[in-house]
Structures are given as C-alpha cells and as structure tokens.
Amino acid sequence: MNKNYDVVIIGCGTSGAAIAYTLSKYDLRVAVLEKENDVAMGTTRANSGILHAGYDPEPGTLMAKLNVRGVEIARELADKLGYMYKPVGSLVLAFSGHDVKTIKTLKARGDANGVKGCRILTKEEVQQMEPMVSENVVAALYAPSAICSPWELCLCMAETAVLNGTDLLLETEVVDISREKDGDWKVVAARNLDPLTQADAKDRKSTELLEFSARFVINAAGLYADKVHDMAAPHSFDIIPSRGEYYLLDKAEGFRARHTIFQCPDENGKGVLVSPTVHGNLIVGPNSEKSRPDDYSTTSEGQAYVKKASAKSVPSVDFRNNIRNFAGIRAKSDRADFIIEEAKGAENFIDVAGICSPGLSSAPAIGEYVAELLAGKGLALKQKPGEMKYYRKPAHFKDLSADEKNALIAKDPSYGRVVCRCESITEGEMRDTFGSPIPPRSVDAIKRRTMAGQGRCQGGFCGPQVVKILAENLGLTEDRILQNAAGSWMVIRKEDR
Amino acid sequence: MYDLIIIGGGPAGLAAAVKAKECGLKKVMICERSTELGGILNQCIHNGFGLTYFKEELTGPEYASRFIDMLKETDVEVRTDTMVLDISPEKEVHMVSPAMGYRVEKAKAVILAMGCRERSRGALSIPGTRPAGVYTAGAAQKYVNIDGYLPGRRVVILGSGDIGLIMARRLTLEGCKVLACVELNEYSSGLNRNIVQCLNDYDIPLLLSHTVTNISGDRRVERVTVSEVDNKTKQPIPGTEQYFDCDTLLLSVGLIPENELSRDAGINLDPRTKGPYVYDNMETSLPGVFACGNVLHVHDLVDFVTQEAQRAAAAAAEYVKKGQPERGEVLDVKTAGGVTYTVPQQICPADLEGDTKVSFRVNRVFGKSRIVVSSGDRELFTQKKPFMMPGEMQNVMLPADILKAAEDSITVEARED
C-alpha cells in the first residue's frame, strides 16, 4: 500500500466518507484512517436519520448553506447509489401562540436559506395529514425533508470511494501528527493487532505503528476532532459531546407517523421527534445530555423523558412495541457553526469539526466544500480518466419480483434461504456483502449492510446463523467473531471457559 | 391444489400433519424454515417432555422424533429450508427455499403453527450500554446445544421463564458460573419442577421481586445492576442495588406468538394472547385457516401443544371435506377474576359432542380455589384447583350440555376459597 498520499482523511463517519467520495472523482491519492473496524461507528451510527429541509440554521451560516446544498446532493445520491431515502416531509408542531411565532420565524429562515416548499398549515390540515397527532396542535410548519438510513448513506459513499481507488484503513487510530521537513504532514497511526480485544493505542504490544505522509490532512474525527486537531495545531476548539437517547419501535407502530414530527426547537436543539424510519419502524427521541465521547448508554431518566416529551406530539405511541433503545452522541463544538477551515498555525491541515445537526443533511455538501477548500490551497482537482464507478448494493431479495427471485436462486440457491426472519434477509444477500468494497467484520456490520437482525427479534433467531456465515467467510472460528467493535466477542469455546 | 398446508414443522405442525393424514386428507404439505423438522425441541436436550402425552419422560429431540417417525409413514410432503413469506386470504401460500425457489401454492385449508419468539432487551427497555453478551435464553441454548459454544463465563439470568431456568442448569453443567436468576414478580413464571431441578439443586439464587436496572460494559458486558422492585408498582426501589460482575446476561422474559404472517393475511389477533382469535375448532377469523401451538398462545408443556394441534388438524380435515361449518349460535368466552385470557375465545355449541377444552392462564398465584364457568348469572360448571400459578397453563373440559345451555356468552373465572 502506498504510504504517500495527497490527502489523508482521519475518520470515516458521514463527513469523512462524503469527503472521500467527493475526492475519489479526482486523480488523487487519498487514504481514510478509521480507528474502528467499520465505517459509520461514531455519531453516524445513532441519530434520527433526518435529511432536514434547511429552515433551522441561521441564514448566512455554513450550516444553512451546506444543509440546503447537502440535501440536494443527497437526493441525487439516492438514485446513483441506491441507499434508502424517503421524502416523507416534516412537520414542526405548534401548540401555543408562542409556538406559532416560532414556526413563522422558521418559515422565514427557510425562505431566506432558499428552502422551497415550506408552508404553514392550519390545525385541520395538520390533522388531515397526520391523523395520530395530538389534538392540542394549533398549527404546523410543513417542510420538504426526507428520511434515510444514516449508516447506509455513509457506507455507500465510502464504498464508492474505495471502488474508485481510495485506501480505507480500518482499526487504524491516529496517535501523532507532525510536520516533515519537506512540508508534508506525517501521520502516525496504531493498528489494532487483535480485533478480539479493544486496543489501547498507546500499547505497542497490541498494536503496530503505521506511518503515512500527506500533503493535506483532513480532520473528520467527529467526537475526537478536538484531540486530533491538538496533535497538529494549537488548541482552538472543544468538542462537547451531547448524548441523545431513542426508542426504536416495531413496524406495528410505524403507522403512528407519516411525516417526521418535530416540536418547536429550543436551546437544547430540535427536541423530541416522532418519525417513521426508512425501514418502516417508528423512531422516537432524542433527549440531550452532556456526556463522554464514548458513553453510548441509555438511562431510565432519559427514556422516561423521551416517552413523556413525545406524548405531547403523538400521545398514542405504544411503547410496549419497543424493540430497541439506543443512544447517539452529537459531536457539538463550543462554536455555533460547523468548523470547516484550515487550522490556524497548521497549513494544509483542515478541520471538519463540530458537525452536529444538521450534519447528516450537510455531509454530501461538506465533501464538495472541502474539495473546493483544497483546490483553493493549490491541490489540483483533475477528473480521473474514464467514468466514475458507483457502488450500488444489490436490491433486497424481498423487494424483487417472483421471476427475479427465481432467477437469483437459480444462480445461487443461498438466495432462497431466509436467515433473518423478521426482515426476510437471505443468506445470499449476507454472502454478497463479503464481495463489497468494504467487507463486514462483525455481526452488526452485516446488519448495517443488509438489515439482518434489526427487526423485532433483534437477532434472537438469526444471530447464531449470522455468526456462522461470518466465520465461514472470514475464515475464522465462531469464537473469533465480534458483535460490533473490537472487544465485543460473542461466544467462547467450551474448552476456553 | 393442496388439501392442507401446515406452516411450521415444530411440535404443533408435526402433530397436525400426522393427524390430518389420520383424518383422511390426501395432499398435505408441511413447511419448515429450518433445515430440520422439530422446531425448538431440537435444542431442548433436557428431559421432561411427553409425561402427559406419552406417559414417559423424553428429551426434546426424542419427543420430536416420535412425530417425525410417524410422519415418515405418511405421504405428507415435507419442505424444509422453506420460509413462508405471505399467506393470502384466498389461502395462497408464498414460500421460498434454496431447492425449489420462490413458489405460490394454493390450499383448501391452512394450519398456522409458526410458534413464538423470545422477548428481547428492547421489550424491557433495560437502561445502560449496548455491549455484546446480552442474549435471549433461547439463542444461548442454540449456541450451547447446537453450535457447541458457550455464551460467556459468568452469567446472570433475567426472568425465570422455563428456558432461562433450563439454561441456568445447562450452563452450570458446562462449567460457567451462574450468579443469579432475577425475577420481576414475586413468583416465578417457570414450572415449579424447573425451579427445584435447575436452580435449587445447584444453589443458584432466585431473586424474586428484583430486576436488572442497568447494564454496563463498553464492548462486552462487564456488570449488571440488580434492584429490588416494589411489588405493586414494579418500579425499582432506590438503595437496593446489587452489582454482579459478569460477562453475560441471558433474558428469559417471555415469549411472543409469531403472528406477522397472520396479521398480514388479515386474521384478527387477540391482544391478550398475541395469537389469533379462534373458535372451539381452532379456526381463525379467516375461514379455512386454523391455528395451534405457541403461535396461538404460549404453552407450558409441549404435550398440550400436540393435543391442540390434533384438534386443529381434525377440524381442518372436516373443513376440507365438508366446507365451512354452519356455526349457529356463537358463545363469546369472557374472563373474570384473575383469568387473563382463554383459548378458544368463541364456542359454537350447536354441533358439539363430548367435552370442549378451554385453556387459560391466571394472573397471580392462587391457593385452593375454584374455576367457575357461568352464563349470565347462572353458574354452569365448577372445578376445584388446589393451586394455580401464572407459569402453568390451566385447562378445563366443558361438557357439551352445559355449553348448549349457555346464552350469548360464558365467563371463566378463578375464585380463591
């Protein structure tokens, strides 16, 4: 592998993936260094999955500009890359005269930001569009937002980047950044040698050091962006992780919301939403609490708050149909806007930090924006010869016609074996993922690629079978298979007890 | 066109298939999504099956093999490795398998025998981190008994359902340390014999009126917090926390009949059982579609599943031969006094001969008590029960004449003496 790069990107969440995707169009040597064993493992893996219309950010901010442009590209990418995208639209509910003022302000902001299609709805219109909404609603702001699966968006951009020549190094944690004599950056990373255990990047026994040199370094390290920044430049911002807890409910509850239903935003953010997911479930959350960057735990207080707050919008949600609680962590910074700039005192070191909401919506535009920044710094963006290759994952077996299903099974009988019963995912689809540009290394990586295990039984039935399929395809025994990140072993051999 | 398609090749489906042949049906198919017939019995290698039905003690695989052997003597078409994706109201069954591809097969009658699934962590909303090492007891049982691996070394079990109790013993025998079995209620939801043979015999503490209130560990479970709960509110009592350092938490917190196919087919489901509403012939709201076993309501003993499946198969055979029966008057079966549900939920007394079995569960522990069946203010039937607990399914046999004497509805009630 070539250790000399034009650009090294640190972190493969949605921002890093979008930048890699954008740069992969050009004749450049690009590497992405990711400390976890898959992409989308930080903020991307757990958030609301909303592609916001763009009425929320203050006009003139980077957030406003990138949000509006980002969702435009996201829509195009849905066609090109085939990730799940549904333009369901959103409602911000108003319950009081004060709220009505707020939604009018939001509408005006949307207009100023160039968002088309926002409109204020009367109580009757809201109730007609969204029958399960609380009868206390007095008006709402409709906006043309969409929903997506965030890890899928990240994954398909990263996969396409890899397909077009980007080097993605997983389990590779940056530990040091320094300037070389020739002016290039030297990036030192520790690679975990034993995926079964969570590596300590400082422990030389469990890791090996890799060195990369690069003309440009992009800091897309999400929750750790301040730490990575400080390796290369004088301290200039803090990341203030903010945890949000969610309920994910069974598809039987999916009918409770047709749109993404928000309450009026306050100082804590956009508040608790009730929304359909692209997979047909119902998502309810989040709250907002300061947290450590690695504390994805949920709390009984947080859960109780989310339940109570959501009842204001949609009182009938039946939480007995809950299938999963989870928490995500927003990578907020101590600044009000996104930080996308060259770090002061560190030429050619670009921070992409503080990418909190509307980060997912903005990500595709962040890719474009960073490419422009790099071009401005003298990086030649020359289109690669030939057509850009797009990685499109195969369609879900269950969505195919009877003839298409039979054609696939005739080619490979494992498409006829349904492993995940809840989501009807076949063994063939799981096997396919090992031939993709970023093959899975864990049970949850298969889930992110196929939906297997995300249904109502939460892997109760298919878990052991998925472990087998992973073991077979990775050439490992079952006791070496991980649930998710390094250290998340699933079973032990009887002789090892 | 098949006379009968049975969905599910576990104990319910197997007994239904054998019985359907005995009743003279010709073209019968049984679909099983796994590669082997037998369903969950295949991983239940402990004994205790068959005491009621066979009057001897068998292991799960032995119990299943009795029916698999009987099935081999018939010409029932067995399709394993076959997943049913959809059932239409016209009884077209959409199925897929590696061997035969995607097919639509039509049947005169269908028996639903899909069984149930385990409630997972999400159903309880247990706070904490989301590490590896939280498994349903059934998944752990599969790892240990089928795949030959252990789920971990130090184990806490939440819930005292039978699979959890069985796994407490199994894991102990495999050399794991089972630290405690934690039960929210003040009584176990498992069979008493399993408490004695799986916990007491191995000195595994059963913490009644306790629950797991937190899970910690970033990548793998490291610790669970257990708190006592208030028996009235079921809320944890602050200050009662105990901590167990463990790498595994098994959940045995209830089973849910697996009725996604039934719901999509438009079959009416009972929110109490989470299974279809059925008449006394086990027919659902969709004519010609019958249900039995754990897809209908969660059973305690497989022997009762077998009997229920035979009842459904006999009725399905009648349906195929004679068409939809004239129902005549329909009695609703209502519940009172601690009875949580009944199966069947409706009885048609007109053509009844002999006794009709009504199964139900109670919502608390009952000492010496009586089951009273009444219609309006007339008591039609009583039966003494020395002891009843929620973990055990109750059955009463109601004579035809008392059902024929009822009007509109009957009520099944538990009264403690």
Image (tube, coloured by chain):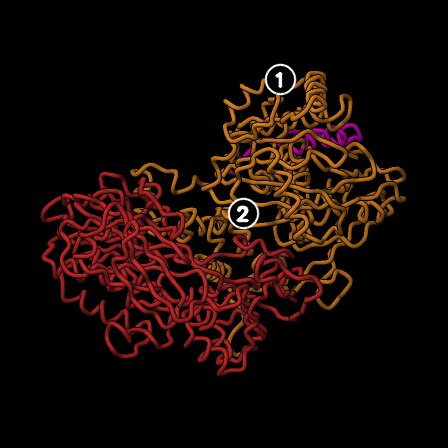
Chain colours: A orange, B red
The stretch of residues the image draws in magenta is A363-391
Farthest residue, direction front: B377
**Residue at numbered disc 2:** A448
Reading the image, the residue beneath label 1 is A120
Inspect the magenta stretch and tell me whether residue A380 lies in it: yes
SS of the residue under disc 2: helix
Callout 2 environment at 10 Å: few (<14), some (14 to 19), or many (20+)? many
Question: Rounded to the nearest whole Å, what is the CA distance between mark 2 and mark 1?
Answer: 37 Å
Q: In the image, what residue type sits under mark 2?
A: Arg
Could you say which is closer to the camera, residue A334 or residue A203? A334
- The residue under the point 15% across, 54% down is B352
Question: In the picture, which quadrant includes the C terminus of chain A?
Answer: bottom right
Q: Label 1's element? A: strand
Q: State whether residue B59 is above or below residue A291.
A: below
Question: Residue A326, percent across and down?
Answer: 61, 49
Q: Is residue B188 above or below residue A327?
A: below
The answer to whether marks 2 and 1 mark residues whose Cβ atoms lie closer than 8 Å is: no
